[in-house]
Amino acid sequence: MTAPLRPAAIHVGTTTSGITDLRVALRAAAVLQTGEQARVEVSMAKLFCTEMAVRAASSGLRVLGGLGLTKDCAAERYYRDARMLTIPDGATQIHKLMIGRQLLGLSALG
């Protein structure tokens, strides 16, 4: 492999391995289809999927270097949009707190 392709190969490998871990989201959907409450599963899915989108977009920016930061490059918009996904329905830290409290049997509010 030529040196210029190495960063792209690393990006593809990292992103693909993260995306295959989307089983978390599928598990949340399966629990919801049974009619059961799936607060932990949904929080885990939202947390994982949004963070994976940010990591993938950030990795793409690193591969493109300075060009990826220009408004003319779609990668800049992808990163901005991915980062924004971590805010609606509760910030990443809130989901981590909710997951931890639920798994430890603590009150979600306390």
Image (spheres, grey):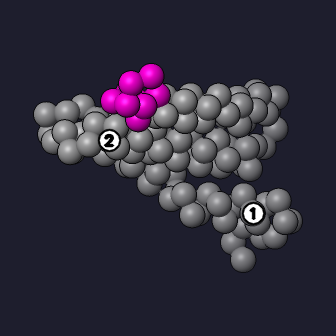
Closer to viewer: mark 1 or mark 2: 2
Q: Which residue is mark 1?
A: 100
Relative horizontal placement of residue 15, taking residue 108 as reference (left or right): left
Residue 109, position as x, y percentages in the image = 69, 72
Residue type for callout 1: Gly
Q: Which residues are magenta?
A: 1-9
* Residue in the picture at 33% in, 30% down: 4
Q: Nearer the viewer, residue 37 or 82?
A: 82
**Residues under numbered marks 1 and 2 in contact, where contact means CB atoms less than 8 Å apart:** no
Report if residue 76 is visible in the image.
Answer: no
Residue type for callout 2: Leu
72 part of magenta stretch: no
* Residue in the picture at 46% in, 28% down: 9
* Residue in the picture at 54% in, 30% down: 13
Locate residue 96: give its quadrant: bottom right
| Structural crowding at the residue carrying mark 2, measured as other residues with C-alpha within 10 Å and reported as few (<14), some (14–19) or many (≥20) | many
Q: Secondary structure at mark 2?
A: helix
Numbered disc total: 2
Q: Nearer the viewer, residue 7 or 94?
A: 7
* Residue in the picture at 75% in, 63% down: 100
Report if residue 87 is visible in the image.
Answer: yes
Residue, far bottom: 110
Residue 98, position as x, y percentages in the image = 69, 61
| Structural crowding at the residue carrying mark 1, measured as other residues with C-alpha within 10 Å and reported as few (<14), some (14–19) or many (≥20) | some
Q: Nearer the viewer, residue 57 or 13?
A: 13
Dividing the image into 4 quarters, which one contains the N terminus? top left
Return the mark for residue 61: 2
Residue, far top: 1
Residue 94, position as x, y percentages in the image = 58, 63
Q: Main secondary structure of the magenta part?
A: helix
In three-dimensional space, the C-alpha distance between marks 1 and 2, rounded to whole angstroms, equals: 32 Å
